[in-house]
Image (cartoon, rainbow, N blue to C red):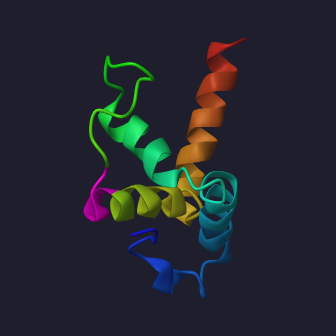
Amino acid sequence: MRKSKKEYRFKDNPRERIFYETFMDKHFNDGRLIDFVSYIIHGTSSTLGNPPKKMVSEEEMGAFLSCIQWLGSPVGQGFLDDVKENIEEELK
């Protein structure tokens, strides 16, 4: 699965679509999306080449992509604004 669980929201929430599409353009087109997300969720093994410890399931992939989409939502944007503010404050 390479889809968000909330794609029905794209029509009414174009920012969510933009976040999702930007992520997919950057990480899916090289054919390594599953590896990339697997590294993030499961970490790397200690074997030669450091492959992911485990590949993500369809359920995990859908949840991960839904989180990326969520960053474009009004609540996700508020979270990003808070993070930016905290970073700026801490790095003064």
Q: Quadrant of the C terminus?
A: top right
Residue in the foreground of this view, choosing between 46 and 83: 46
Check if residue 57 falls in the magenta segment.
yes
Q: Residue furthest top?
A: 92
Image location of residue 79, percent across then percent down: 53, 47
- Is 89 placed left or right of 58 in the picture? right
- Residue that appears at 34% across and 40% down: 41
Image location of residue 27, percent across then percent down: 62, 52
- Is the stretch drawn in magenta largely helix, strand or loop? helix
Image location of residue 42, percent across then percent down: 30, 36
Image location of residue 25, percent across then percent down: 69, 60
Q: Quadrant of the N terminus?
A: bottom left
- Is 41 placed left or right of 15 in the picture? left
- Is 76 placed left or right of 54 in the picture? right
Magenta part of the chain? 56-60
Residue in the foreground of this view, choosing between 33 and 62: 33
Q: In the rendered image of this protein, does residue 25 appear above or below residue 14?
A: above
- Residue that appears at 38% across and 74% down: 5
Q: In the rendered image of this protein, does residue 53 appear above or below residue 1?
A: above
